[in-house]
Amino acid sequence: MAIPTSRTKEAAEILFHSDKCTGCGLCVKACGDNSLEIINKKAAKSDSAIFGCIGCGHCMAVCPTEAIEIRGRTLSVNDLYPLPSREKVSDYQGVLSLFQRRRSIRAFKDKDVEAHLIEKILTAAKTAPMGLPPSDVHVLIFDSKEKNRRFAADFCDYLDGMKWFVSSWFLALMRPFWGKPNDELFKGFVRPMFHVYTSQMKKGINLVNYDAPLSMYFYGSPYTDPADPIIAATYAMTAAESLGLGTCMLGSVHPLIQNGGKAKKFREKHGIKYPSREGLFVAFGYPDIEYSKGIRRTFASEVTSN
């Protein structure tokens, strides 16, 4: 049994085509599990594997003679593709320019995002690195303004039934347990957010997802590396920017639909399969405003280790 995920709990199968193997050892260097070794000048399975083959495919991808094949954990030789040449890769300045042009867009044109662009966004997001293959990231897609508004209205109804969560008595009760930073966050952000989301929705103003023509919710399973949904969402956002779309990361929904019976019912109603330690909504659409300047950002600290 290999490391489990929600998709598979078995180790992948390693197959060798010894007649093609030159014993170059590249597969051994690439394997992070010590699953491979060179025996009698041929690649072979090792007796010192750490976890068993997790199906990363590195050995199969690096082999110059196609002498090794991985099957299982959703992977097969049919998943290999030729890497783009270096000449087709954006240089640093091109990537930096894309990042610098990005702004969080909350005003979208009343125009659908075409299906082929949605597919391109998902294709790019699937290339995101993950803690453990196969990817345990799940994506829920709201592909119209109407679907996003229905979800937002339902979320606001859900918040209306949870007002106790930001009440003064509950925050006072919880402060000794979750500390001053969380107390300040709830009083300064979460409680006002509850009020503004619900009160504005009653006026017909959607501040949850801004009536975006497209949004995607990236979330995991109980097995998922917490970073995986966030990285995949970032890849999706970057791909969308390259396609001329505006994007906005929406961090307020995910934390509030994870715990408790009402949260479970809400997830089930919207086809969300699992609670997830981390998750992120991203809104997409054609921007209704154009920025001419960016804003320089900084990290809280940058320290080189001794």
Image (cartoon, helix red, strand yellow):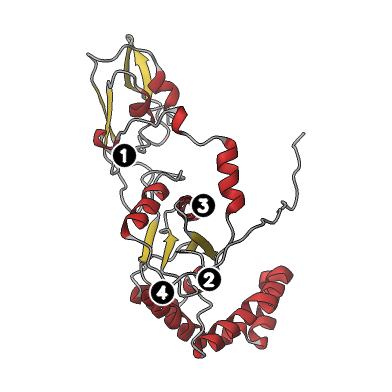
Whether pointer 3 and pointer 2 mark residues with C-beta atoms closer than 8 Å, the reply is no
Residue under the point 35% across and 33% down: 57
Specify which label sits upstream in the sequence, 1 or 4: 1
What separation in Å lies between label 1 and label 4 (alpha carbons)? 39 Å
What numbered label is drawn on residue 148? 4
Query: What residue would you read off at disc 1?
Result: 11
Amino acid type at image mark 2: Ala
Q: Nearer the viewer, mark 4 or mark 3?
A: 4
> Crowding near pointer 2: few (<14 within 10 Å), some, many (20+)?
some
Earlier in the chain: of badge 3 and badge 2, it is: 2
User: Callout 3 environment at 10 Å: few (<14), some (14 to 19), or many (20+)?
Assistant: some
Q: Nearer the viewer, mark 1 or mark 4?
A: 4
Instruction: Say few, some or many: other residues with alpha carbon within 10 Å of mark 1 (under 14 / 14 to 19 / 20 or more).
Output: some
Between circles 2 and 1, the one closer to the viewer is: 2
For the residues marked 2 and 4, what is the alpha-carbon distance in whole angstroms?
A: 14 Å
Return the x and y of residue 14 as percentages of the image width and height: 28, 29
* Circle nearer the N terminus (2, 1): 1
Question: Which part of the image, by quadrant, shows the N terminus?
Answer: top left
Q: Residue 213, which numbered label?
A: none
The amino acid marked with disc number 1 is: Ala
Question: Label 3 is placed on what type of residue?
Answer: Ala
